[in-house]
Image: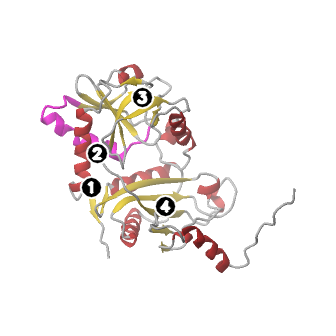
Amino acid sequence: MEESQVHVFSSATELVEKLHQKWSSVEKVPYPAMYSSVYGGIILDPALMVIPIDDHMVHRGHGVFDTAIILDGYLYELDGHIDRILLSASRAKISSPFPKSTLRSILIQLTSASKCKKGTLRYWLSAGPGDFLLSPSGCPTSAFYAVVIDEEFSQCKEGVKVITSTIPMKVPLFATSKNVNYLPNVLSKLEAEEKGAFASIWVDDDGYVAEGPNVNVGFVTREKELILPFFDKILSGCTAKRLLELAPKLVENGRLKNVTVGNITVEEAKQAAEMMYIGSTLPVLPIIEWDEKPIGDGKVGELTMALSDLVWEDMVAGPETHRIKVPYV
């Protein structure tokens, strides 16, 4: 069989023309803006939204990331997410190339330049480009990347089915840091989809419920207590923590009896009246079936939706301490 000749690009101009071909037929560009500390600025051309192949985040997974929501021209919980990425970076031994205030300013300016009023803002801190070795000692500096994703999302109101994952969950050091090593998460999600479920639930070695593949999980017991698993072995979700701050409103009006975090066994969890995923774009997703058995009466829970309403209203019209108005030009 005759081998085909591999094309050699003779110039940067030819290569850029090739990159543009991918986007020439796209009606709406999904990524209106990107920031790269390697470039030193904001890129509006999606064909040029690339990172170096020798970046240690690419070939060694030495990077961390986080995400914030853009809703109605506001960034939701941005400061909390920046604090978390800096904590993740510290655990990964990555020094940010900028102080927190500069990271914050870059992300707000990037969102403004994107003109996106609804979507997600995703950003990474990397050990940076330099070489293909294991140690980042050959990397001159760390790198910061960010991209605005123009996407539609809405408050989730339909219930989903989940399974118990057979994919081993990450050890606490890696589970509590939002790093780019997401292979276990991907395999856990694929396992669920292959079995006709939406996603999965991880259970730790002690038999306690942990989290979903990229979301936290919560339960309303038959005694009307909201309980979320401890965050000591799982990611401390910004939306989950905000839910814990808002949920006492339902205690005040008598709909919930208590709000707490704690250990919950699989047996206890499956006996709950209601179950939910908790994450940025959901913000609360009802779970109606686990391992082919109904949760409660197998219908979307009334208290689950009340909790969802609390977070969604906070995203739409909450205090300025949690919502940053983007200064679009």
Comes first in the chain, label 3 or label 2: 3
Q: Residue at x 50, y 34 (%)?
A: 192
From the viewer's perspective, is residue 75 above or below residue 304? Answer: below
The residue under label 3 is which amino acid type? Val
Determine if residue 238 is in view.
yes
Q: Is residue 30 magenta?
A: no
Tell me, yes or no, whether the two marked residues, 4 and 2, touch with CB atoms within 8 Å: no
Comes first in the chain, label 4 or label 3: 4
Please give the residue where the numbered disc 3 appears in the rendered image.
209
* Near-viewer residue (224 or 115): 115
Quarter of the image for residue 13 reads bottom right
Determine if residue 38 is in view.
no
* Residue extending furthest toward the right: 1
Which segment did they paint magenta? 234-258
Query: Is 290 placed left or right of 296 in the picture?
Result: right
Comes first in the chain, label 4 or label 2: 4
Residue 197: give x, y in percent of width and height: 46, 34
